[in-house]
Every structure is written in structure tokens, then in C-alpha cells.
């Protein structure tokens, strides 16, 4: 089986497992994950969060807490002209959030852009991660491009079952430094 097919097959398996998670279990695991992340956030001055999709663990409470603590927080936004993502700073979630490309929450155009090389910490969604820091995304390569340009510690965020021993990788796939689940934090093997 070629690499794109192997990745596609794994995406189908993971999505099927994600669909079976009840909202109650997802909520409890999101709380556990946020508690685990709290130990990482205080040392970071500028954090790139992500707006969770319905099947992802909810890191939004960490975004709210970080903003309340005065941390510089940002979310990715889709730049239609460049067909890629950048990052914009958030000040007020009620006023700054709009629904962007692909139906994902993102910062309004009025928010200041932050260069991707100015972050201390980047929280990264994914369908799966492995112990070597490899990430399986949704197949469009957007986060691979963000991670290629971004500075700082890159932390994958997933359910425990999404952390695998090994996932199929291609040369353009970006790695993360750590993976956090509701029950553990793992530093990538080098």
C-alpha cells in the first residue's frame, strides 16, 4: 500500500472511533487535558491555540484562562489570497471571533497578525500522533505549513487512543515536540 493510501485508511479508522465518543466523555476528557496543559501554559508568553472541531478535545477553556492571565493568545486564520494560514492575536473572544473558512472559528480581520515565528507554544490538533512526534492531519497540509514556519514548542493534543506507536509519514509532514492526552504527556522520541 502506498503512503497516501495508508494515511487515508488510518484517517477513516480514527474518524470512526471519534464518532463513537459521547459528548459527555469528550467533555470529561477535555477537562482532564486542560488540567494537564495548565502546567505548560504559565511559562509561555505567546501561544497559538486552535479552535477545536466538534470531534476534537476542547482546549477553548485554556484559551479563555490564558487571555484572563494576560498571555498573548492567537488563533490561526485562513488567508484566502495566499491559500494558507497565518495567526492573529485575540483580545476579546466575544468581539474577536468569526466563523472562517471550513466553518472553523478564527480571529476577525481587525485582529493584529502575529508572525508564526513569534510563538513560545503551539497547540496542535491532529487525527493521530505517534511516539516519534509524527502527526496525521485531516489531509490538506495546512498545519504542516504552519508548523514548518512556527517557532516555539509544538504540542500535539489528542485522545489517548489517537496516540499510536507509529503512523505513516511523508517528507513534508511536520513533527511535534510533545503530545498531550487526557492521561499523559509524552516527549517525542528522537
Image (cartoon, rainbow, N blue to C red):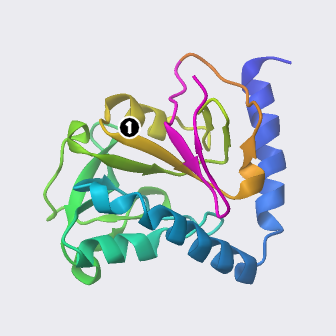
Q: Quadrant of residue 88?
A: bottom left
Q: Which residue is labeled 1 in the image?
A: 146
Give percent across and percent down for residue 27: 64, 79
**Residue span colored magenta:** 172-190
- Does residue 101 appear anywhere in the picture? yes
Q: Quadrant of residue 8?
A: top right
Which residue is at 60% across, 41% downward? 137
- Does residue 104 appear anywhere in the picture? no
Q: Is residue 111 left or right of residue 122?
A: left
* Residue situated in front as seen by the camera: 125 or 83: 125
Which residue is at 29% across, 56% downward? 43
Give percent across and percent down for residue 134: 61, 31
Which residue is at 66% across, 48% downward? 127
Give percent across and percent down for residue 38: 43, 67
Give percent across and percent down for residue 135: 60, 36
SS category of the residue bearing label 1: helix
Mark 1: few, some, or many residues within 10 Å (few <14, many ≥20)? many
- Vertically, is 170 above or below 29? above
* Residue situated in front as seen by the camera: 111 or 168: 168
Q: Main secondary structure of the magenta part?
A: loop
In magenta stretch: residue 62: no
In magenta stretch: residue 177: yes
Amino acid at each position: 500500500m502506498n503512503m497516501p493510501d495508508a494515511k487515508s485508511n488510518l484517517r477513516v479508522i480514527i474518524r470512526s472511533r471519534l464518532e463513537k465518543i459521547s459528548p459527555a466523555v469528550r467533555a470529561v476528557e477535555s477537562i482532564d487535558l486542560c488540567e494537564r496543559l495548565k502546567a505548560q501554559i504559565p511559562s509561555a508568553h505567546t501561544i497559538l491555540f486552535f479552535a477545536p472541531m466538534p470531534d476534537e478535545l476542547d482546549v477553548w477553556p485554556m484559551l479563555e484562562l490564558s487571555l484572563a492571565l494576560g498571555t498573548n493568545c492567537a488563533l490561526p486564520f485562513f488567508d484566502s489570497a495566499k491559500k494558507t494560514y497565518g495567526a492573529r492575536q485575540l483580545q476579546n473572544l466575544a468581539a474577536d471571533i468569526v466563523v472562517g473558512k471550513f466553518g472553523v472559528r478564527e480571529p476577525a480581520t481587525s485582529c493584529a497578525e502575529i508572525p508564526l515565528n513569534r510563538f513560545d507554544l503551539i497547540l496542535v490538533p491532529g487525527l493521530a500522533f505517534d511516539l516519534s512526534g509524527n502527526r496525521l492531519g485531516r489531509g490538506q497540509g495546512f498545519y504542516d505549513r504552519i508548523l514548518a514556519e512556527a517557532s516555539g514548542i509544538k504540542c500535539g493534543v489528542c485522545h489517548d487512543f489517537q496516540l499510536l506507536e507509529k503512523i505513516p509519514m511523508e517528507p513534508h509532514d511536520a513533527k511535534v515536540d510533545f503530545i498531550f492526552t487526557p492521561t499523559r504527556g509524552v516527549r517525542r522520541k528522537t
